[in-house]
């Protein structure tokens, strides 16, 4: 299961980069991108691209470090360590990978939303509510999973 989540996480990184590059290439002629429908907040396309890439990269590096550190931590049966059993350790690694995947999906949905918002075609954003709510729902789902898991 962890290998599947790692594969999906790498795939989501590729999808994010593709979506970000498409938005950057498609709107490169525009000087500013609007971040909300009322045009209250505008940001330059280069600033948007590099800031998005930086935030996304820092987040994924942090999640990778947490995952690798968790794998390297030993299990202590006496209760003095971080994990009491190998099962809890594997469950935590699984949760970290699923949370990272959920946040990657959230980043992808944000990029897609901003792309639709700045498109010269008149998209009715109410028909794209699935894209808008996909990220927060994925994060919420990944936060609820540990509550449903069985800790022995």
Image (cartoon, helix red, strand yellow):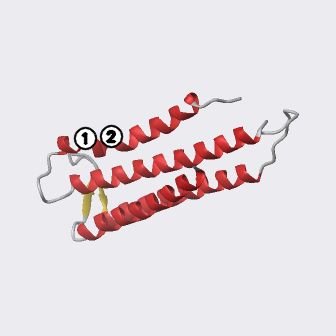
- The correct choice, above or below, for 39 with respect to 47 in the image is above
Name the disc covering residue 129, or none. Answer: 1
Name the disc covering residue 46, or none. Answer: none
The quarter of the picture where residue 16 lies is bottom left
Q: If the image is split into quadrants, where does the C terminus sit?
A: top right
Q: In this view, which residue lies farthest toward the right?
A: 78
Q: Position of residue 75 (x, y in %)?
A: 81, 43
In this picture, residue 136 sits left or right of residue 123: right
Mark 2 burial class by Cα count in 10 Å: few <14, some 14-19, many 20+: few
Residue matched to label 2: 133
Element carrying mark 1: helix
Q: Position of residue 102 (x, y in %)?
A: 46, 46
Element carrying mark 2: helix
Q: Nearer the viewer, residue 123 or 102?
A: 102
Estimate the spatial distance between the alpha carbons at disc 2 and disc 1, rounded to whole Å.
6 Å
Q: Residue at x 78, y 49 (%)?
A: 73
């Amino acid at each position: 299961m962890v290998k599947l989540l790692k594969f999906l996480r790498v795939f989501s990184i590729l999808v994010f980069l593709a979506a970000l590059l498409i938005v950057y290439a498609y709107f490169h002629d525009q000087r500013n991108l609007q971040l909300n429908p009322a045009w209250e907040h505008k940001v330059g396309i280069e600033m948007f691209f590099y800031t998005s890439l930086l935030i996304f990269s820092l987040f994924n590096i942090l999640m990778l470090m947490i995952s690798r550190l968790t794998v390297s931590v030993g299990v202590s049966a006496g209760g003095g360590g971080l994990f009491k059993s190998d099962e809890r350790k594997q469950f935590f690694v699984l949760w970290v990978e699923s949370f990272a995947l959920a946040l990657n999906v959230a980043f992808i949905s944000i990029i897609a939303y901003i792309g639709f918002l700045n498109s010269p075609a008149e998209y009715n954003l109410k028909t794209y509510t699935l894209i808008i709510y996909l990220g927060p729902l994925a994060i919420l789902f990944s936060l609820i999973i540990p509550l449903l898991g069985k800790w022995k």
